[in-house]
Each structure stands twice: as structure tokens, then as C-alpha cells.
Image: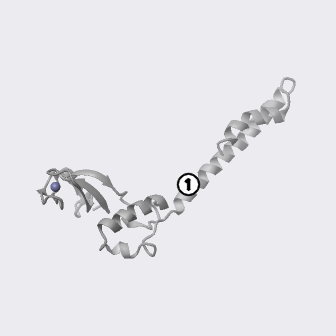
Amino acid sequence: MTPPRLTQLRCLACAAAHWAIDSDFNGIDGVFVYYLEREYRSPACGYAGAGHAVLRQTPPEFLLQPHPMYPVSRKEFDHWARILKAHFPDHPLVRELGKEFTPNTRVHRTKLHDVRRGLQDRVLSNRKAVVAADLKVVAHAATAEAAEQHMAAPLLRHL
Ligand SMILES: [Zn+2]
């Protein structure tokens, strides 16, 4: 069984949307049943049966927050938390919003940090390469600094 997700479904009969909480894979044997084949009841018209189409779904990690391995950004968490609160006001996690139920955003920040570090490393190695190349063609190059600035400027602009 995979983590339950908030899933917005469109009714086959009246096309109205409603929300359900369901897992992609149900049961201990983890059998996948297409959402279209699952039976839901449309609160708008009372139709109960298959044929509901999925409109939107939370990421599987949303209801597992704060998850040490699967972070969710604050913006995305707040977006889905509003939907949880509006459509499932009695859900136990609604009471925990802002307390136990809060996003792990730590890994997102680490990823961003790694991206910045990677870019800085590229600029530094680029500078070394420019200086090395410049020393070889010193008779033709204007100055090492001019060449370095020329080569590093496009990369520095992305920092
Ligand atoms: Zn309906």
C-alpha cells in the first residue's frame, strides 16, 4: 500500500469535482486499480460508481510531512494544506497544522545550496583554465585579467 493522497475527481454523470483520500496502490498486495475503475460517490448528484476522472492529486509525500527523505516546499505544503482544511476539516492532521504537521523543507535548501556551490566551483575552475591558457599565449593575450573577466562573466551572471 502506498501513502494516501488527496485526489480531486470529476463525476462521470454531472462533471462536478469532489475530493477523496485514496492510495494509488491499495491493500497489502499492492494491486493498482485505475482511478477510473474505482467507485466513488458524487456529492453533487449522488451518482455512485466507476468513471470518476482524476483532476488533481497531492504528491504522495504530502500527508507524510515532515518526512526526512521526501521534503515538500513551504509554498506547496501550504497550498495542499488549504485544500485539506477546506475539504476534510475533520482530518486529524488539520488539528496538527502548524504543530506536528509541518513540511520538511530542509533538503530543498540543501539542494539549492549544492546548485550554488556547483556554479561557484565551475567559475573557479574556469578562471584557472583561463589563467593557464593565458600564460601559454601571453604574447597574444591582452592581459590575464581581461581574458578571465571575458570568460567568467557569463557564468558569474548566473550566480
Ligand atoms: Zn455527479
Crowding at mark 1 (Cα within 10 Å: few <14, some 14-19, many 20+): few
Left or right, 47 with reference to 55: left
Three-letter residue code for mark 1: Lys
In percent of the image, x 35 and y 62: which residue is there?
Answer: 83
User: Depth check: 92 or 148 in front?
Assistant: 92
Residue 37 rendering spot, x and y as whole percentages: 16, 52
Q: Name the residue tied to disc 1.
A: 111
Residue 20 rendering spot, x and y as whole percentages: 25, 62
In percent of the image, x 28 and y 58: which residue is there?
Answer: 7
For residue 61, which quarter of the picture?
bottom left
For residue 102, which quarter of the picture?
bottom left
Question: Which quarter shows the N terminus?
Answer: bottom left
The answer to whether any part of residue 9 appears in the image is: yes
Q: In the image, is residue 23 above or below residue 102?
A: above
Residue 150 rendering spot, x and y as whole percentages: 75, 33
The answer to whether any part of residue 34 appears in the image is: no
